[in-house]
Structure formats: structure tokens, C-alpha cells
Amino acid sequence: MAGRSTRPTLEEVAARAGVGRGTVSRVVNGSPRVSPQAREAVLRAIDELGYVPNRAARTLVTRRTDTVALVVAESDQRLFGEPYFAGIIRGISNGLGDTGLQLLLALARSPAEYGRLEEYLTTQHVDGVLLTSLHAEDPLPAKLEANGVPTVLGGCPPGLSPVSYVDVDNRSGAREAVGHLIAGGRRRIATIAGPQDMGVGIDRLAGYREALGDAGLPEYVEYGDFGEASAIAAAERLLAREPELDAVFAASDPMAFGALRILHRRGRRIPDDVAVIGFDDSSAAAIADPPLSTVHQSLEEMGVEMARLLVSRIRGEAVDEPVVILQPHLVLRESA
């Protein structure tokens, strides 16, 4: 239609195809309730007229936005500074790649922002929600489900029973790491644990304690927030309590890097004097000084699985296994 100044309408497509407006709408929205002949006529008319469906109108008809949100309740510094989030986002993007769904990244850095985000997500602005880095008894997952918004979590916070989530077997990963330290003759093994209002922090500390309990060894525990700065302070406290520590298990790679920094500063040889193991197997682990032994978790696989579960729920498909637990494994390098 060369030279026309307005977009072709649904009615014009219907007239060209010789069908009713409702038939065109059903074809545009993928309904199976259209005969093959009518579908072919409508598609031919769409092609001839250059018709582009109005997204807003389509949303009104289908109540679908073709958008899903990833909610991260953390600061910008943590989101862009820690490898966990980059891996999860890559995996989710890959998982959504051929679904036609767009990914919206939503940050909630304060209670006020969280409140506004909750209102936005529960008023039909998105088809589904992915949440990660949640803390204890967060009310958002339950509120989303109550409002009919399919929701999938990355990790399982304490106090919640989500419909669907993807997690890593953090307890067994920590137990394997500490077991390796014990098998290597280490007897004063400390941990820098993660926040105890997060399932991942609780489970990695539990794995550490199980391994030490089985071996009859004492515990040396300090806490961080999974970031490097918090681990620097925690490592200082550990060495003040027990100067003869011979191993540290850190509940994240950034916290392991913080511990390495303090141990270097105190003149400890690694791994001769103190062995160090982290958790993540981030890209920086292999180029640390020395290269860091760490527990590998596939963050991209976690993101892909989160996206897969959410897409199935949005489409109303039966989900046989709404909870997916991925298995980690220990990667040994020069630090332990």
C-alpha cells in the first residue's frame, strides 16, 4: 500500500480476507479455533496490507504482556559487582531466547521501592516473575501467586514454601569442600558464612558444621554478606580469635578473595599455612593469587531452569517437577 499515511486496521484486514473481525483477532492471537482456509486468507491479507498488530490492543484481548520480570532485592553495587547475578541473568536470557518473552530487570533497593514494585507486578503489567536473592519471610512471592502471577524463585528463603523454585544443593557442596580440607590434615578450619536470613547462607553453614561434627573438630564461625568487604572484616576477627587457623571455607568466592587478602597481609602462606576454599567457581577464581579452589555451581543452568519453569507456568502447562535442585562439585586449584 505505497503512499498511505495511516497503519492498516484490523477491519481492513478482515475486509481484504473476506472474514469477520473476530476471525482476524483469533489468527493474530494464535487461537486454534480458526479453519485452515480462513487462517491462510487472513495471513495473506496481513502480508499484502503490511498489518502490524497493536500490542496494547492485543494485551487487552489476551491479558498477556509478553514480559516477565526478574526482581533482585539488592543494591546496585552487589548486582553489578558480584558474579552470581551476571550468571543468573545470562541463563534466564538464554532460557527465554526463543519464547517471544521480554525480560524486565527490576531492582528493589529500599522498602519504599519494594512497595511500589509489588503494586506494579500485581496489576497485570507482567506475565510472570522471577525472584532471586530473597531474604527470610519475604511476602512478595505469596502475594504474586495470590494475584495469579506465576512466580519462580532462585533459591528458597527460610520461612517460605514457594510453588516453584530452582536451587543448588548448597549443603552437600559445603560438606564436600570442608571434607576435602579435613582429608588434607587441616584441623582448625574456619568459615565465613553468608547471611542467615537466606537459605543459601543457612545451608552452606550447615554443610560446614556437619563435616566438622563428623570429624569431631571445633567450629570457628564469622559472618559476611557474600561480598568481599564483609569477608575482610570477618577474616580479621577469625585470626584474632584463633591465630593458628589452618583453613578457611568461605561461603562465596568474593568472600574467599577477602580472606586471601587478609591472609596475604598477615604473611600466611597459601596453602602451606592456611588453605582456602570458596563457593561459586566464578571466572575470577582461576586467576586469583593463588588460583582459588572452589565449589562449582552452574549459575547459567540455574537461570535456564528458572526460565523454563516460568514459561511452562505462564502457558498453563503441567509442571511435573516444580522444584529443581542442581548438584555442585568441588574444583581444586592451588589454594587448597
Image: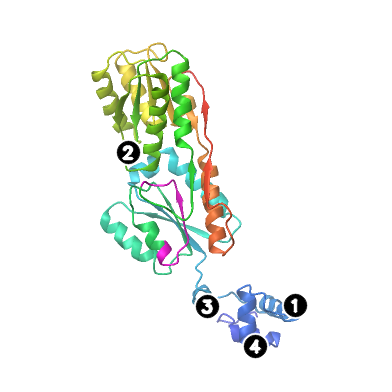
Q: Find out whether residue 307 is within the magenta segment.
A: no
8 relative position to 223: left or right: right
Q: Earlier in the sequence, mark 2 or mark 1?
A: 1
* Numbered disc 1: secondary structure: helix
Q: Taking 35 as reference, is 82 above or below it?
A: above
Asked if residue 284 shows in the view, the reply is: no
Q: Nearer the viewer, residue 117 or 135?
A: 135
Q: CA distance from mark 3 to mark 1?
A: 22 Å
What amino acid is at disc 4?
Answer: Gly
Classify mark 2: helix, strand or loop. Answer: loop
Q: Pick whichever of labels 4 and 2 is earlier in the sequence.
A: 4
Q: Residue under circle 4?
A: 20
Q: Is residue 253 visible?
A: yes
- The CA distance from mark 3 to mark 4 is 16 Å
| Residue neighbourhood size for the residue with mark 3, other residues' Cα within 10 Å, grouped as few (<14), some (14–19), many (≥20) | few
- 264 over 209 or under it: above or below: above
Q: Earlier in the sequence, mark 3 or mark 4?
A: 4
Q: Position of residue 222 (x, y in %)?
A: 29, 29
The Cα–Cα distance between marks 2 and 1, rounded to whole angstroms, is 58 Å
**CB of mark 3 within 8 Å of CB of mark 2?**
no
Please give the residue where the numbered disc 1 appears in the rendered image: 36
Mark 3 residue type = Val
* Residue 61: mark in rendering: 3
The residues colored magenta run: 145-158
Q: Secondary structure at mark 4?
A: loop
Please provide percent x and percent y for residue 173. 48, 31
Write the residue at 33% across / 42% down. 77
Which residue lies under the disc numbered 2?
195
Q: Residues within 10 Å of mark 2 (few under 14, many from 20)?
A: some
Q: In the figure, residue 81 lies in which quadrant?
A: top left
Amino acid at the residue labelled 2: Pro
- Quarter of the figure that contains the N terminus: bottom right
